[in-house]
Amino acid sequence: MIVNGTGATFLLQLALQVDRKQVLPQVLCDPGQQAVAEYWATGLGRWTASAGCAASHRNEDFSYWTSTWAAAFTALQGEPAYEDPAVRTADGVFVWDAEYCVVSGFLDLPRAELLQNYSAVMKLQEDACGSEPLKSITEGAPAAALQGIFPKVDEMFAEEKNKSAAQRSAPLLQPGILSRVNAAHCAAGSYSCMIHFCLNNFCRLGDGRIGQGCQCDSNFSLKPIPTN
């Protein structure tokens, strides 16, 4: 036990030498983004969890979804590196959405072109949601009933995370699961929001893993906290 002032000063100096970014979620680029993430994920900005996509459509600006609750929540809920038959993630990546973005094919779309083109993203939603199998699934059940797929997938991921990588299955590759997830997004009008979110928030890294946020773009940032 250190009881003298010299020892205490040494420990303080040692602590101050620790890189502050090591205690941040690994997908945020700047220490100031931690407070911004908390505002959108759990603070006054949390309204964007349920209404951010609708706001994106009203304003023809996907940042009301892509750069608010969706990005903030997944940044704060980052997980250790993960692997299953569908995805291999870097440390700090939110696995559920990373796998969704991969198996939906959204990370294969032209990122630079679509991130700045609201109309083009909406056209992708129109085409996908108006085609089979999403069209039939959406028309065959109430929108509220379709939302039941999300807790089911939560449970599937929880079960797989208790297994070794070699033993895992990929929840979103199981028969019918991805179609039901995307049909739920079609019914809610959020399929387009998810395309934009995936392209803005996730990427394939050079070694094939899926990265998120600052791992993909050193200029990655969340929507600023409103000042009024």
Image (tube, rainbow, N blue to C red):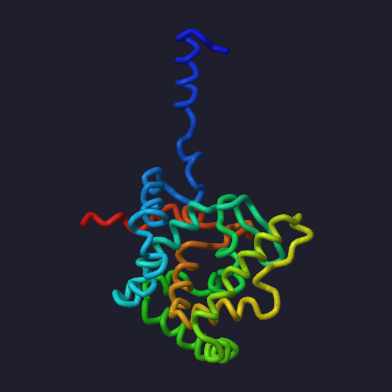
Vertical placement of residue 119 versus 2, above or below: below
Counting the numbered discs, the total is 0
Q: Residue at x 56, y 51 (%)?
A: 92
Q: Which residue is drawn at 59% across and 57% down?
A: 206
Side of 11 relative to 158 (left or right): left
Q: Where is residue 180 in the image (x, y as percent from the top left)?
A: 59, 80
Q: Which residue is drawn at 42% across and 74% down?
A: 114
Q: Residue at x 48, y 54 (%)?
A: 75
Q: Position of residue 163 (x, y in %)?
A: 75, 56
- 26, 69: nearer the viewer: 69
Q: Where is residue 87 in the image (x, y as percent from the top left)?
A: 65, 63
Q: Position of residue 84 (x, y in %)?
A: 70, 62
Vertical placement of residue 170 versus 224, above or below: below
- 126, 161: nearer the viewer: 161
Picture quarter with the C terminus? bottom left
Vertical placement of residue 161 versus 106, above or below: above
